[in-house]
Image: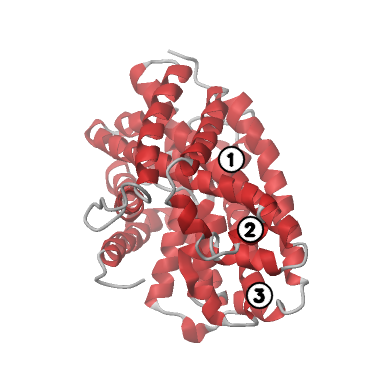
Amino acid sequence: MEKRNSFSGRIGFVLAASGSAVGLGNLWRFPYLAAKYGGGIFLFVYVLLALTIGFILMITEISIGRKTGLSPLAAFGELSKKWSWLGKIATFVPVLIFPYYCLIGGWVTKFTVATLTETQATAQDSYFSGYISSTAEPVIYFLIFLILTSFIILLGVNNGIEKISKILMPLLLILIVAIAVFVITRPGSGEGVKYYLLPDFSRLSFKTFLAALGQMFYSMSLAMGIMITYGSYFSKEESITKSAHQIEIFDTLVAFLAGLVIIPAVFQFSGGDKEALQSGPSLMFVTLPKVFNALPAGKIIGTMFFFLVLFAALTSSISILEAIVSGIIDSFNISRTTATVLVSIYGIIVGVICSFGFGIWSDFTIIGFSILDFLDFISNSIFLPLVGMLTCILVGFFLKPKSITDEIEITGPYVMKKYYSVMVKWIVPVFIFGILVSGILQSFGIISI
């Protein structure tokens, strides 16, 4: 069996885990949800939930990983043989996500190139739909993105994940700050900044709360087995709580800055029309190219923005693949190279099928979903909240919260032990159950979130 790798220190761990958390959820999903659900009030609720529920889930998962020194596939069985099945479900989540996440990463790669070389063309309404429905080009960009992800995983934890995170994460932060400063200093962006930063409590609703809760859950890489995997590489000499706070701050800061780029830019482009913010998931690939085409120096700003999204997508895809590869290594005692190649072949097959689901196989649906949307539905709306909820139940009622707080206290006293116990046993699982039920009902059109 290969010797288990480890991060060189807390900085390496924090940047790698932040790279996992900072992905398309922050730079794509967060801004369009903030735009849709009232700007400032959505931001306020999101930050509140991230500091409470998100933090509890993160320290729980990191502690499980460090306590067992194993990937989720084996970690849950190490904690309780009766709960080993939860490790299989937790590992199944990144298995589902990896192929289609790399396909979307390929879309971002394409737009990074196209924004530089054909800026005006990307501003056309039909450009994105025409691209994803074609047969060869999306597959080519998908393969480029997947192969790059796999190559970094082949290099290992220190030479691959940690080194690339130490380069990409500071660069990502510098880029997004620079773009945000440029956008908010443009004439006409002031109203967008006010809409985004000033909470309007009259717009606070149950839907806003659920949307913010779901976004917090997904954007922080929780219940995907990733934080457990990265926790298994984390030194016993480093503080879990300090590291979790730093990851959370970095993740939330990038999401906040992404909103500060996109919402004022769309406001400026539309002349203050809030309806322009309601385009939902297409905001990045359809609306934003129009904004960049209309902005002064739009080609440069647009290219920098999509480079930024590409970096974020890459660091997240690395963590998703690592969660799978680590589980295979732990369970079957095979080399990192063999495990990575096997998962990459699987990812290519399923990713190509997902891509064809928008083109030559677009007539094929699964309970009304396209192939990609179906995988997204069962992973994000069912398995993610299910794993998060069951992890809290396992820790709260079977292992007892002390099993986690003892791991946290290896580096010093944890003064919030009672708070942690109440949160992990009662508050967090109830809220996650709300995500699970609402996500299912929304996907079948019973409610609209």
The image quarter in which residue 257 lies: bottom right
The image quarter in which residue 7 lies: top right
Which residue occupies the foreground of this view, 134 or 169? 134
Of tags 2 and 3, the one toward the viewer is 3
Note whether 307 is above or below 326 in the view shown. below
Of tags 2 and 1, the one toward the viewer is 2
The residue singled out by tag 2 in the image is 253
Task: Label 3, secondary structure: give it.
Answer: helix
Amino acid of disc 3: Phe
Please name the residue shown 44% across and 34% down the image.
Answer: 323
Q: Residues within 10 Å of mark 1 (few under 14, many from 20)?
A: some
The residue singled out by tag 3 in the image is 269
User: Tag 1 or tag 2, which sits nearer the N-term?
Assistant: 1
Please name the residue shown 30% across and 45% down the image.
Answer: 394
User: Tag 3 or tag 2, which sits nearer the N-term?
Assistant: 2
Task: Label 1, secondary structure: give it.
Answer: loop
Which residue occupies the foreground of this view, 274 or 82? 274
Note whether 90 is above or below 333 in the view shown. below
Which residue occupies the foreground of this view, 368 or 54? 368
Q: Residues within 10 Å of mark 3 (few under 14, many from 20)?
A: many
Q: Quadrant of the C terminus?
A: bottom left
Give the CA separation, mark 2 to mark 3. Answer: 24 Å
Give the CA separation, mark 2 to mark 1. Answer: 21 Å
User: Tag 1 or tag 3, which sits nearer the N-term?
Assistant: 1
Amino acid of disc 1: Ser
The residue singled out by tag 1 in the image is 239
Amino acid of disc 2: Leu
Give the CA separation, mark 3 to mark 1. Answer: 45 Å
Q: Position of residue 346 (x, y in %)?
A: 36, 30
Q: Are the residues flagged by discs 2 and 1 in contact, CB closer than 8 Å?
A: no
